[in-house]
Image (tube, rainbow, N blue to C red):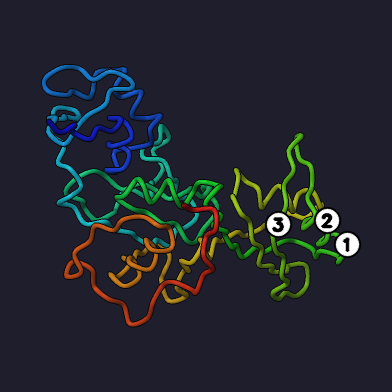
Amino acid sequence: MTNEKTEKLQKMLAELGFGSRRELEQWIGSGRIVVNGQPAHIGQRVTGKDRIQVDGKVVNRRSSESCRVLVYNKPAGVICSRRDPEGRKSVFDDLPKVRNGRWISVGRLDIQTTGLLLLSNDGALANRMTHPSTGLDREYAVRVIGKLSDTAIQRLLDGVEIDGELHRFNDVQYYNGSGINHWYHVVLMEGKNREVRRLFDAEKLTVSRLKRVRFGPVMLPSTLPRGRILELGHADLKALYKLLRLPLIARPERHREHRRSLLLPYPELPNLQ
């Protein structure tokens, strides 16, 4: 007799792209998820033979669905939440359809921050890329009113305590500027809520524009207009999943190759097993 492999229901659904584990626990609690005709319960484990329904629709396992990653150049004024009581435009409004699961944003950008936002139908990839232990950095182009002194730059690299928590840049590079406006490129490891703005605020400088230009090895192409999307080609998907040490489910024929890669060379991630 063989034992069927089991996994937690919310983990399986999160990896299919239905939402975060916390969201899915709320769905389970509200009765939106059914397993084999019975309401699911928190902590329930399922096998490949179980029949799972979300909002009455049967869930197909990801074995038949290709992993996809979108590169989106987010404009200002667009939110990263799916729904908004104020009716503001969401990054999810105009995405291509997925047959199974749904798109998940890989991290977030606040409403006024522009630039690179990754979206995937693979919850495992989204979790791996955003988890602090993975060690992926984020790079931002920042326009500020004023200019940092060498001493201020060193303070931002050493770390600044804000509301009892230490924040710091991993790198600060002056880019260009004139008059009162100056551009910097800064690198963060986590990108906590409004962290770039708060660090410059600590040096009495106001951020007038903020744009994410890189997330780990994925760069924002300078030719991609705001509000437009590119999908990673098969070669880039293979390289990204290999870096993250995740299994890739993908059919090469469904991914158009771009003239050039959207990935930069990136060091191995020593914390991953």
Residue hosting label 2: 155
Tell which circle, 1 or 3, labels the residue nearer the N-terminal end.
Answer: 1
Distance from disc 2 to disc 1, alpha carbons, whole Å, reads 6 Å
Q: Position of residue 85 (x, y in %)?
A: 41, 32
- Above or below 196: residue 230: below
Under tag 1, what secondary structure? helix
> Label 1 amino acid?
Thr
Under tag 3, what secondary structure? loop
> Label 2 amino acid?
Arg
Distance from disc 1 to disc 3, alpha carbons, whole Å, reads 14 Å
- Above or below 241: residue 134: above
- Above or below 6: residue 66: below
As drawn, the residue found furthest toward the right would be: 151
Q: Position of residue 139 (x, y in %)?
A: 59, 63
Query: In the image, is 187 to the left or to the right of 41?
Result: right
Query: In the image, is 54 to the left or to the right of 153?
Result: left
As drawn, the residue found furthest toward the bottom would be: 259
The residue carrying pointer 2 sits among few (fewer than 14), some (14 to 19) or many (20 or more) residues within 10 Å by Cα, namely: some
> Label 3 amino acid?
Phe
Of residue 40 and residue 204, the one placed in the foreground of this image is: 40
The residue carrying pointer 3 sits among few (fewer than 14), some (14 to 19) or many (20 or more) residues within 10 Å by Cα, namely: many
Residue hosting label 3: 169
Question: Are the residues at dot 2 and dot 1 in contact (C-beta closer than 8 Å)?
Answer: yes
